[in-house]
Amino acid sequence: MAEGPAVPTVFVVDDDPDVRDALAMLLTAAGRPVEAWASADAFLAGCGPERRGCLILDVRLPGMNGLTAQQELDSRGYTLPVIFISGHGDIPMAVRAVSAGALDFLEKPFSEMAVLDCVDRALVEDEHRRSERERIRGIERRLAQLTPREREVMDRLVEGKVNKIVARELDCSTRTVEIHRARVLHKMGVANVSQLVRYVLGHPDYPGAAAPAEEEESGG
């Protein structure tokens, strides 16, 4: 039975029913919700990118193999941490998968403790990734509230420019900059420019200065 999207789940994709059953029994006994699939195609058709948890994926699968499935997951916006399982002869493929972003790989036959350790790390990683995405979305939501002029003022403040310089560059009065600055701080949910700099530069795509100078709080 499929768990709800909010429940962290361990998804097992392996065409060998014995492996699927063994992993499902182990993980269920350890208190981890499990869903098992016989192919990557079936998993992609039945599990959306909003699901939480991690994915245990066999390197060699009928139809879409594990490496191709990993690429497909990325292209469709899945962010589940992936643990590859492989036979001895598939280790080079598993290493390539890790280089491409998989969290880890396990060589068959693997110990129960190794599986549980990997799964626990993957579930923690999934929570971290989701928290980071939500943090970035929060910055984007606040940035979207700014008017074009407020964004121009903010970008210059983040670069370390004081109000007088901003006013000169934007051809307006210092008082106008002060008003926009106050609105920017309010909309971005910060108390001062130092906090603003740290906050917006926390977005990986923000085109701010790499090492902005700190402005005096008087904003002179």
Image (spheres, rainbow, N blue to C red):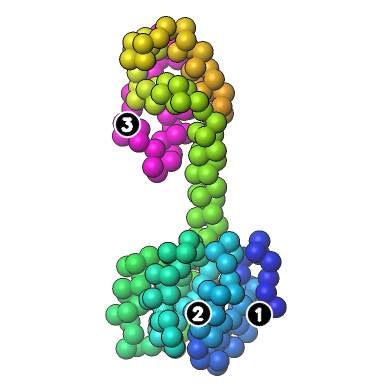
Distance from the alpha carbon under mark 2 to that under mark 3: 44 Å
Q: Which residue is mark 3?
A: 209
Q: Position of residue 14 (x, y in %)?
A: 50, 85
Crowding near the residue tagged with mark 3, few <14, some 14–19, many ≥20 C-alpha atoms within 10 Å: some
Q: What range of the chain is rendered magenta?
A: 194-220
> Upstream in the sequence, badge 2 or badge 3?
2
Image height check: is 9 above or below 171? below
Q: Which residue is mark 2?
A: 41
Image height check: is 47 above or below 65? above
- Residue at horizontal 42 percent and vertical 6 percent from the top: 173
- Predominant SS along the magenta part: loop
Would residue 216 be counted in the magenta stretch? Answer: yes
Q: Position of residue 120 (x, y in %)?
A: 54, 67
Q: Is residue 62 or residue 59 the one in the foreground?
A: 62
Q: Which residue is mark 1?
A: 29
Q: Amino acid at mark 3?
A: Ala
Q: Is residue 171 or residue 39 the one in the foreground?
A: 171
Q: Amino acid at mark 2?
A: Asp
